[in-house]
Image (tube, rainbow, N blue to C red):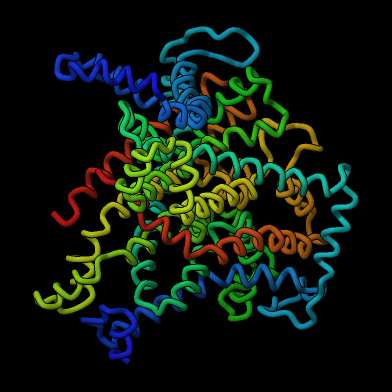
């Protein structure tokens, strides 16, 4: 303590004479404890989040197979991905369809339900929030959808359709390629009211009440106008955070799809980039190729986040 | 009706009866959609075998039975590794990972939110960017890191990466920034308190909702942790993994399967019910500025 004080006093003589680098160094030394507090988290974070991203960028340029020393093959993996791998192109198409639907829809539903829930009394609010949020935290409860849409007559939906006379033989929902995509999208949406939903619920509750009164004086006539011109602009930070969460999870629904329709899905109709990555990285151990897949997916996620951030920053302007 | 609401909400201006009605209608319809699968899981878990396989299937149970749950536990007792071991593994992993994540995130969040040091902007931006991609894309090279650190096939393979999860740090930092006034910290610093003391005695009590929320998020993730590709030993595998092995057994196990899902979902839901208000309070400062 005393040591740092004298050091500080010595330097205080010439603060404006310090160069930028010197000043930074001085500030860094003064705040040593800040770095100490950061260190444990950032060491682990670097090892398991930052390093892997950089590493897979590098490995994607090689033919690493975990056994032999990798050869540098440059863009070969990427060329193979986009020109030679038909299944990868199917996966890209499916991922984009899947993300383009689940991302925005889950975002808008979260926002809409959070807004509606905010209109309820506090007790009801807590209950309804729980009902909407529960599917996203309940582990593998989405497996019940295989019972609801099971391909025999014991599946609820088939039983209902047979009873009411719409069909005479059960529909094979999870093997018929025209039903699979819509079904997994519905299930994914069902589990998607998660972190962003909670963020919106909270966002609605902290909007400054006096703004509403002022708005009413200024001639706001109904709740739609109120939402558009008062509530949403003041929740912009939550909307931004919610968008990031929604996009990130819309690219990561691989596990649910596998649980519902198996891997590989019939005719690859629900094969996503996540599955392709798992196939090459986790089963064939073609790490170079898998890293190229991961890199493509990484840039797709970051890219769509950037685009959405740009778009959202225009809301209310 | 509307007068009452003015008292309760302070802002029940511009509320039409038709609007209230349609909002409640929409919430009811979607609420049923959200809740029905959860409800049906519970009903399936309580159905005896003859009700599980009857046509047409019933939406309710006539003779509720606990047999599916007892079946689940007797199936468990036939497993090669004692079943209590799987439960211990999941509890141990969840407890250690959650504790570590909360501790490390709190230290780092305090530093980023309340100490002005060079580099804090860059370090926080990295966290924000990391929220923008799913960490599974980073997963494939983790095997290399883990084998270098001799972490493969140990508890650490799951616990350590969980400690460095960035969502918790993000939420905590945002919450500290909005709910801990700088003036309090300044006067404590003038009184000669160390940063460490300030964090423990002043800041942590003030941000209780934030670390409670972090406990819940971290716990939920770890509790549902299934098979990890970095763990091969049967005696280190988790409860969800063991359950998923049991329930892939076909017709005879349909009831046990539903029972296992109920067992798995009860814990996270209860935890959320108890702490909902804290979670909402924390999430109110989750916003991202551009």
Residue at (44%, 74%) from the top-left corner? A125
User: Total number of numbered labels?
Assistant: 0
User: Looking at this view, is A42 or A173 the one in front?
Assistant: A42
Q: Where, by quadrant of the figure, is residue A196 drawn?
A: bottom left
Q: Can you see residue A293?
A: no
Q: Where, by quadrant of the figure, is residue B147 drawn?
A: top right
Question: Residue A102 location in percent, x, y?
Answer: 42, 53
Question: Residue B279 location in percent, x, y?
Answer: 47, 59
Residue at (80%, 65%) from the top-left corner? B69
Question: Residue A144 location in percent, x, y?
Answer: 64, 62
Q: Quadrant of the C terminus of chain A?
A: bottom left
- In the figure, B143 relative to A311: above or below? above
Q: Can you see residue A284?
A: yes
Residue at (71%, 48%) from the top-left corner? B91
Left or right? Give the position of A88 relative to A100. right
Q: Quadrant of the N terminus of chain A?
A: top left
Question: Residue A35 location in percent, x, y?
Answer: 42, 27
User: Looking at this view, is A6 or B133 the one in front?
Assistant: A6
Left or right? Give the position of A311 relative to A99. left
């Amino acid at each position: 303590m005393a040591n740092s004080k004298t050091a500080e006093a010595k330097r205080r003589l010439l603060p404006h004479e310090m160069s930028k680098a010197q000043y930074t160094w001085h500030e860094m030394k003064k705040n040593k404890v800040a770095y100490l507090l950061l260190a444990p988290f950032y060491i682990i974070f670097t090892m398991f989040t930052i390093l892997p991203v950089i590493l897979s960028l590098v490995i994607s340029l090689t033919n690493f197979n975990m056994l032999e020393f990798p050869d540098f093959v440059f863009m070969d993996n990427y060329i193979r991905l986009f020109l030679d791998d038909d299944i990868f192109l199917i996966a890209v198409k499916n991922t984009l369809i899947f993300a383009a639907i689940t991302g925005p829809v889950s975002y808008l539903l979260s926002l809409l339900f959070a807004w509606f829930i905010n209109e309820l009394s506090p007790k009801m609010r807590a209950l309804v929030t729980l009902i909407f949020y529960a599917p996203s935290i309940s582990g593998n409860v989405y497996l019940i959808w295989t019972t609801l849409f099971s391909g025999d007559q014991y599946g609820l939906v088939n039983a209902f359709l047979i009873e009411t006379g719409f069909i005479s033989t059960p529909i094979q929902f999870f093997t018929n390629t025209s039903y699979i995509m819509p079904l997994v999208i519905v299930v994914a949406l069902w589990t998607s009211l998660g972190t962003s939903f909670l963020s919106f619920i909270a966002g609605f509750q902290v909007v400054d009440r006096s703004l509403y009164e002022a708005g009413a004086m200024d001639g706001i006539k109904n709740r739609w106008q109120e939402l558009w011109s008062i509530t949403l602009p003041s929740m912009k930070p939550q909307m931004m955070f919610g968008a990031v969460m929604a996009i990130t999870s819309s690219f990561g629904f691989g596990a649910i799809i596998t649980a519902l329709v198996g891997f590989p899905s019939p005719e690859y109709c629900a094969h996503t980039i996540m599955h392709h990555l798992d196939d090459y990285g986790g089963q064939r151990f073609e790490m170079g190729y898998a890293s190229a897949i991961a890199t493509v997916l990484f840039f797709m996620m970051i890219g769509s986040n950037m685009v959405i951030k740009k778009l959202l920053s225009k809301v209310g302007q | 009706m509307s007068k009452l609401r003015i008292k309760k909400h302070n802002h029940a201006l511009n509320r039409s009866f038709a609007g209230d009605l349609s909002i409640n209608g929409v919430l009811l319809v979607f609420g049923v959609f959200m809740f029905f699968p959860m409800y049906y899981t519970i009903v399936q878990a309580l159905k005896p075998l003859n009700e599980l396989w009857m046509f047409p299937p019933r939406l309710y149970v006539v003779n509720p039975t606990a047999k599916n749950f007892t079946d689940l536990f007797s199936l468990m007792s036939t497993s090669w590794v004692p079943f209590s071991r799987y439960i211990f593994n999941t509890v141990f992993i969840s407890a250690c990972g959650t504790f570590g994540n909360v501790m490390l995130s709190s230290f780092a969040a305090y530093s980023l939110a309340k100490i002005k040091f060079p580099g804090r902007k860059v370090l926080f931006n990295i966290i924000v960017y990391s929220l923008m991609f799913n960490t599974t894309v980073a997963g494939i090279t983790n095997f290399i890191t883990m084998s270098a650190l001799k972490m493969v096939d140990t508890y650490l393979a799951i616990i350590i990466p969980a400690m460095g999860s960035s969502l918790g740090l993000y939420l905590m930092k945002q919450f500290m920034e909005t709910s801990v006034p700088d003036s309090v910290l300044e006067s404590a610093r003038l009184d000669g308190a160390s940063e460490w003391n300030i964090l423990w005695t002043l800041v942590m009590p003030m941000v209780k909702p934030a670390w409670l929320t972090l406990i819940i998020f971290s716990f939920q993730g770890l509790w549902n942790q299934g098979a990890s590709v970095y763990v091969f030993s049967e005696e280190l595998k988790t409860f969800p993994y063991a359950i998923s092995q049991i329930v892939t057994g076909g017709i005879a196990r349909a009831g046990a399967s539903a029972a296992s899902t109920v067992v798995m979902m009860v814990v996270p839901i209860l935890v959320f019910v108890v702490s909902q208000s804290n979670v909402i309070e924390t999430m109110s400062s989750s916003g991202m500025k551009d």
